[in-house]
Image: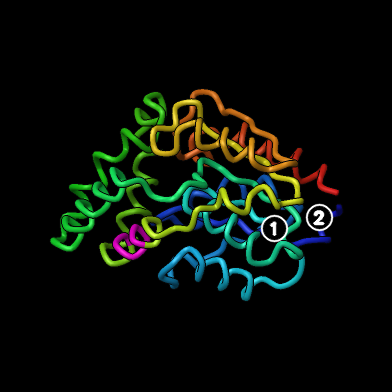
Amino acid sequence: MSPNAFSLVLIPGLAADATMWRHQQTALHAWQPVVADAHHTEPTIEAMAARLLHAHSGPLVLCGASMGGMVAMEAARQAPDRVRGLALLGTNARPETPDMRALRESAIVLFEQGQVREVIEPNVALAFHPAQAARPELVQAYLDFVLAAGAQRLIAQNRAVMARPDARVHLPQLRCPVLVLCGDSDALTPLECSQEIASLVPQARLQVVPQCGHMLTMEQPAVVNAELSAWLAALG
């Protein structure tokens, strides 16, 4: 499948923007990638997927990270005839667990009180591999876009993730190629989540990224870019 046979859409994670895809936008320039923004305007994962499908016409290859992967899986459910490939990075097909729901509800209370930085800064240790968390420029780039998202966007997107559908129901029906990437030290969506996705999709391939946490595109861009480039070149 030639680069012009589909539109490549990069879907950011919760509170993220194009910054998290900056290395991929350069490395994947032959496919003319565009970064979706539906997660900024819609209240649910289902609505985000529908808006993405409306905003980008024709055949699509969707590359989603974390919450973006949830949106990508839902878009494939809504329009299986249009989605020609899925790359799912550090994501989770399961519905929210009671423990995670309680943690998010507690965070939302603090966001409503204006304590955004107090919640987000400790999250660095969960978002990054320890070696990457020691890189000030990387951590600052992460903090910049998450804090810029603001309390209301953080609240809305956490609520969307809490109410996400169980994607495991429809994953076995997917017939497009699926690349699943996960950091070997991902504390937010552990490897078992990616292994489960790969086991459910007939044409899935799982690749574990070493020395990497949850923010794959920023932590190990060279590895991620190589995997995505090879996978895109092989589509079709």
Q: Earlier in the sequence, mark 2 or mark 1?
A: 2
Q: Amino acid at mark 2?
A: Pro
Mark-to-mark CA distance, 2 and 1 = 9 Å
Q: Where is residue 37 shown, x and y percent of the image? A: 51, 66
Residue 3: give its label.
2
Q: Is residue 12 left or right of residue 34?
A: left
Q: Is residue 48 left or right of residue 105?
A: right
Q: Are marks 2 and 1 in contact (CB under 8 Å)?
A: yes
Q: Amino acid at mark 1?
A: Leu
Q: Quadrant of residue 223?
A: top right
Mark 2 surroundings within 10 Å by alpha-carbon count, few (fewer than 14), some (14 through 19), many (20 or more): some
Q: Where is residue 7 shown, x and y percent of the image? A: 73, 62
Q: Residue at x 59, y 36 (%)?
A: 181
The span shown in magenta is 154-159
Residue 8: give its label.
1
The one nearer the camera, 154 or 109, is: 109
